Structure formats: structure tokens, C-alpha cells
Amino acid sequence: MSSLRDAINRVVRHYEKDPDGGAAPDAPAVAVREGPLRMRVSGPHGEVITDGAKSIGGDESGPTPGWMLRAALASCDATVIAIEAARAGIELTRLEVTVSSETDLRGTLGVKDVHAGPVGMHVKVVVASDNATEDELREVVGYIARSPVGDAVSRSVPMTTEIVVA
């Protein structure tokens, strides 16, 4: 844990000295179609495969994009909790973040004028430590408000779309 804490503290000190130096472009994710609904998504650290359910023409050869969104939120929230626990000197013995949601596929398919994305999401955090009180753990979990993915899905993020016909 001390190496994680040391690394985090180095970055925090850097941004304390240069508080305007934090914004930077994120690495793009590039999705390329490989099958009816199968997409290979590549980035600088690897790739993932997504696919649709068989009921809508996919082969289920990978998780759905919606599941990837839930996975991104669960992973990001867990990462923020681990960072804040390390900063506070708390050694976590258990950290589990579960994200669930409900989505109406009729919106995606254009069958009904409803939202295409989740109509709600629920985050459940299970956390334990031998060297922290319940209040200290609740405080650390409260920092998930700093989760970049959680922030993005909980507010309206400006988005543009560029179309290139090749």
C-alpha cells in the first residue's frame, strides 16, 4: 500500500504546484465492426470485444456495450475508493463495487420514444478494513463523487459527432 500511497502523493504534490496543469486529452477508443454487432474496440493499452444479444442479431461473443458502461463505472468507482483509502492509510481487506441498471431496448431500436440508455443506475459498495472505523470507510467511499466515469454518467456531457463517409 505504501507504494500506491507514495505514487498518489507525488501526483497530488505535482498538481498542487501546478493546479492548472491537469486537463489533458484522453486516449481515444476506436470501434471497428467485425460481425453483425461484434465490435473490436482498440486503445493504447489493448482491446476489448463487444457484441449484441442473439435476440437482436448479435452472436454474444463478448459483453454488450451497456455492460461495458457498467463495468467502467464499477471499476472507476473502485479505483477512486482504493486511491482515497491509500491516501488515508487505510488498508482495505475487501472492496467490491457492483453496478446495476435498467434499460429499455425499445429506445435503442427506435420502437418507442423512450431513452436509449439506462433509465437509472445503482451502485453498491462492499468495503472492509482491519484498521479503519465504519465512519472512516464511509468517508472514503464518499469520494466516489470524484469518479470520472460516475461524473460523466451522472451529468450531461457535451458531445459532438463527426461523420466521415469513406
Image: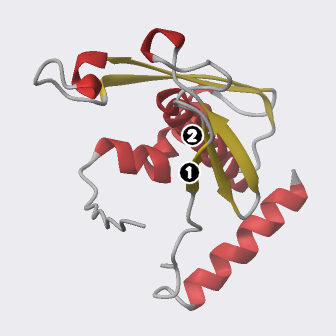
Image x and y of residue 160, in percent: 27, 64
Instruction: Give me the disc on residue 60.
Output: none
Q: Residues within 10 Å of mark 2 (few under 14, many from 20)?
A: some
> Which quarter of the picture shows residue 71?
top right
Q: Looking at the image, can residue 104 be seen?
A: no
Q: Quadrant of the C terminus?
A: bottom left
Residue 4: % across, % down: 82, 58
Instruction: Specify few, some or many for label 1: CA neighbours under 10 Å numbering under 14, 14-19, or 20 or more.
Output: some
From mark 2 to mark 1, how far is it between C-alphas?
A: 16 Å
Q: Element at badge 1?
A: strand
The residue depicted at 29 percent of the width and 62 percent of the height is 161
Counting from the top left corner in percent of width and height, residue 53 is at: 52, 16
Query: Going by the picture, which residue comes out furthest to the front?
Result: 166
Q: Which mark is residue 72?
A: 2
Labels 2 and 1: the sequence-earlier one:
1
Q: Is residue 125 above or below residue 140?
A: above
Residue 1 drawn above or below residue 77 = below
Question: Can residue 71 be seen?
Answer: yes
Q: Which circle, 2 or 1, is nearer the viewer?
A: 1
